[in-house]
Amino acid sequence: MRKRSLTAATALAVLCGSMALGATPAAADSSRVLPVRQTGDIVVDAVHQQVFISDPLNGKIVVTDYTGKVLKQLTTNLSGVHGLELSADSGTLYAAVQDLDAIAVIDTASDTETGRYTVGDKPLSVALAGGRLWFGYGGAAAGDIGSVDLTSETHDVTLGQDNSWYAAPLLDAAPGSTTLVAGAPGQSPVELASYDVSSGTATKLASTREAGDNLGDLQVTPDGKDVVVASGAPYYQQVFRTSDLNEDGKYVTDAYPNSVAIAPDGTVAAGIDGSYDPDVYIFRPGSGEAVRTYDFPNTGTSSGSDLLADSGLAWAPDGSRLFAVTSNSAGTYSLRVLTAPTKALTTVTVDAPATAARAKKLTVKGKVTTKAPLRAGTRLTVTRTDLESPRGRTLPAAAVRADGTFSFTDTPPAGGKVRYTVAFAGDAEHTAGSGTDSVAVSRARPRLTIDNNRKVYSYGKDVRFTAHLGATYKNRTVEIWADPFGGDKPNKRVRTGKVNSHGDLSVTLDLRRDTKVTAKFAGDSRYTSATATATVGTQVSVSTSISGHYKARSTWGHTYYFFHKTRNPLVTTKMPYYWNRAQKFEFEVYYQGRWYPGDPAYFKLSTGGVSKVNITGNHGEDVGWRFRVRSSYIDGASGDSVNSTTHGAWKYFTFTK
């Protein structure tokens, strides 16, 4: 039928004869989109590291490398191409081309067609057995088996070997075998037959109709003893002896079996057409329990996963890879390359305490889970990652118990997040696996302070701030940050350094706004991080001047400015500008021994920080009265809150005739 690849022994012999051809190192599972509309068969050429996939609808054979990369598309009028078979030396590919009533012969070294055999109507499948190329052919109600004599120069074709088949049967045989097995695809119940072909004629050995319903695939085991059948029902791959077709076991999968591939060492890959269950099951020879399963992802638009194609599995002869053809709900086909498929998947779970005290012993537990249990005593590597060992420190190995569990103790020297990683390196039967869990290990809290909190300073004052750090383990570095009030000034690191022998680190700041000063300690392996803050106020600078007077002199305990009653006093105020800032202007009059205030007003500053207020009115009525004015910045009321409230000096004046 196909799907038999070059045997391991033959591949080795061929490879030894050509140093240019070597095995490609295994890589992670991968997937590549195939340029096909349908797939019929898949075979693997280990000598040239190629995979051949037939596409009946497009009439071509797609050639890929072992990564699934398309190397070539053989499209020489191969309409209806379906079954594929490789010669024993992997040098020739035989392809059954239904619409041409022929078998195409392709040289695998050049990937070119070198000839065709004209055979019976609509050949579906091909298989090598007894020195001949056998093929199943025939339309509805006209199924039959024929052969091509590959030893004769004329490649004589013999038809009519068994015309009892309703339609063209699927064929397969073990490498070098003289026993041929045939099955009826799409039939319910499925008819299965075996033949002795040692004489060049197909002599029936046995037949059965117990091979389920709707045959999707079949393959003979490498020793020729059994044939494994994948039919839509029952929900497992059936096994029959080729000699008498009596049942000889089963490989339990799920609904609906549609593919089977057997590696040269007897490992079975059994696939199903299932959207919500594992798609491929791997069984070791003679084992009824899958050692590994694969569940394909969903790359389409439906809710279910991508589906395995009928007859969509094939092994690399060395068992290092399993190739699977899948399709999604959008009709896109992919070639999935599954690496190390014969190895049981290994899962390591680690369970560490949620919290622990530093320098106190703790116990970490866990379990190794695999379909092929590890031997008791198998060593697991243990790595501790913490603040002292950020790249990890190897601890004594842990040993697996008979039930797969393990445990070990450790005394963490460092606090903080401590991660334990337990790993199994893998072996010939198991994949590598690892697991981690973390412990929050306690650390002491250091004492960190910074002075001057809540103090208020004049504008432009140089103020020294000192951070003090108490006892720690190794880290003695402190950062000091200054964050001036207002969205236009960033929080800025102004000093980083090690504290002195007294635990102090200082910095001097030129204060022009209220400022939040923060000391930061990053922590170390025994002490937690810490912060300390001091928020200080900073006043604005306020200068107020009066102009328009004709004289100024000291009287009544202050300097007074004298104005003629015909002049308006001009009061000019300067203070640092900030967006939307206004000065509070206060006006008071002196009467009978005390000052009486008028209603204050706010006047916005120019972008240069200047505000000018002209005092107007009928100053004839003001003659002889004493007045005073003051400009202030009021935190929150002057349009912003980036400085502390600051009052300017009072300015005094009076009017004369």
Image: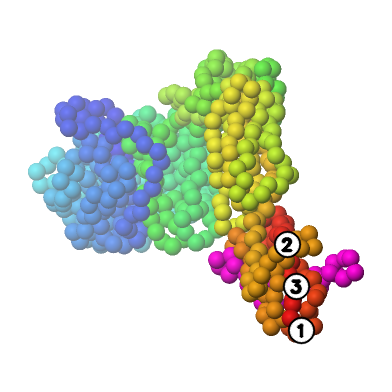
Q: Amino acid at mark 2?
A: Ser
Neighbor class of circle 1 (other Cα within 10 Å; few <14, some 14-19, many 20+) is few
Residue that label 3 marks: 654
- Visible residue check, residue 202: no
- Mark 1 is on which residue type? Gly
Please say if 161 is above or below 285.
Answer: below
Q: Using residue 520 as the reference point, say whether residue 105 is left or right of it.
A: left
What is the magenta range?
588-615
Q: Residue at x 45, y 57 (%)?
A: 328
Q: CA distance from mark 2 to mark 1?
A: 23 Å
* 81 or 403, nearer to the observer: 403
The residue shown at (59%, 67%) is 610
| Disc 2 and disc 1 in contact, CB within 8 angstroms | no
- The image quadrant that residue 577 belongs to is bottom right
Label pair 1/3, CB-CB below 8 angstroms: no
Which residue is under mark 2?
554
Image quadrant assignment for residue 453: top right
Q: Residue at 30% across / 41% down in the picture?
A: 66
- Residue in the picture at 49% in, 26% down: 391
Q: Is residue 41 above or below residue 151?
A: below
Dominant secondary structure of the magenta stretch? strand
- Secondary structure under tag 1 reads helix
Q: Earlier in the sequence, mark 3 or mark 2?
A: 2
